[in-house]
Amino acid sequence: MLLSVLLFGLVVWMTAIEISYFSNMVRPARLFAIGGIGSLIGATIIFIKSRQWARSLFEKFILGMGIFILSLIIFPILTSMINRYFGEKKSTETPYDLIEIKPRKEVISGVVDSISLKRYGYRITVMDEGKQNSFYAKRRRSFRIVDDKVYLPMKTGLLGLMYMDEDNHE
């Protein structure tokens, strides 16, 4: 029971840390593809090691599905963390074709873009290799605009996945 509570708390903590990196990643589908492959491999290994705990075929099915579903939740988060922690330490300014920059404003009931409220960041929409990407920057000094290009602080992780990181940007 205690192990389940600790595992749940760990997953919530990891998700809270990684959610901002998911939304600022170039081609996040690649992250989930790598995480999905890892979850299949991980779930298979864990199931093979733990199937002696189940006596009937139905119990083995329930055990296998539980392990598989948990691994589908955990492995993309782990993939993102591994990509970030073992990748480049310093961000580099990467140019993108600018589509639009919208100030993001928040109220208690949600996000609105038109009324005069305190600014909480910027939604930056860019074109990258013919595909539209959207990033969220907390600070205006995190990016610069020159003509029709926007320069964003990008890092390449261990797995080759790029993401915007404002933390190590001057």
Image (spheres, grey):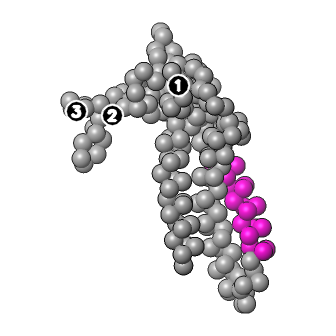
Q: Nearer the viewer, mark 2 or mark 1?
A: 1
The region drawn magenta spans 29-49
The stretch drawn in magenta includes residue 139: no
At a point 28% along the width and 45% down the height, the residue shown is: 110
Q: Mark 1 points at which residue?
A: 169
Q: Name the residue under label 3.
A: 117
Residue 138 at what x, y percent from top left? 40, 32
* Res 50 quadrant in image: bottom right
**Mark 3 touching mark 2, by CB under 8 A?**
no
- Residue 149 is marked as none
Crowd band around label 1 with a 10 angstrom C-alpha radius: few (<14), some (14–19), many (20+): some
Residue 33 visible? The answer is no
Q: In this view, does 68 lie to the left or right of 19?
A: right
Q: What type is the residue that disc 3 sits on?
A: Leu
Mark 2 or mark 1, earlier in chain: 2
Q: Kindly report the distance in space between the C-alpha atoms of the residues bearing marks 2 and 1.
A: 19 Å
Image vertical order of residue 145 relative to residue 140, above or below: above
Residue 138 visible? The answer is yes
Q: Is residue 20 left or right of residue 68?
A: left
Q: What type is the residue that disc 1 sits on?
A: His
Q: Residue furthest left?
A: 116
SS type, badge 1 = loop
Crowd band around label 2 with a 10 angstrom C-alpha radius: few (<14), some (14–19), many (20+): some
Could you say which is closer to the camera, residue 2 or residue 111? Answer: 2
Q: Residue furthest top?
A: 147
At a point 50% along the width and 18% down the height, the residue shown is: 150
At a point 24% along the width and 48% down the height, the residue shown is: 109
Q: Name the residue under label 2.
A: 120
At a point 54% along the width and 79% down the height, the residue shown is: 1
The stretch drawn in magenta includes residue 39: yes
Instruction: Tell me which secondary structure the magenta stretch mostly adopts.
Output: helix
Q: Is residue 49 left or right of residue 3?
A: right
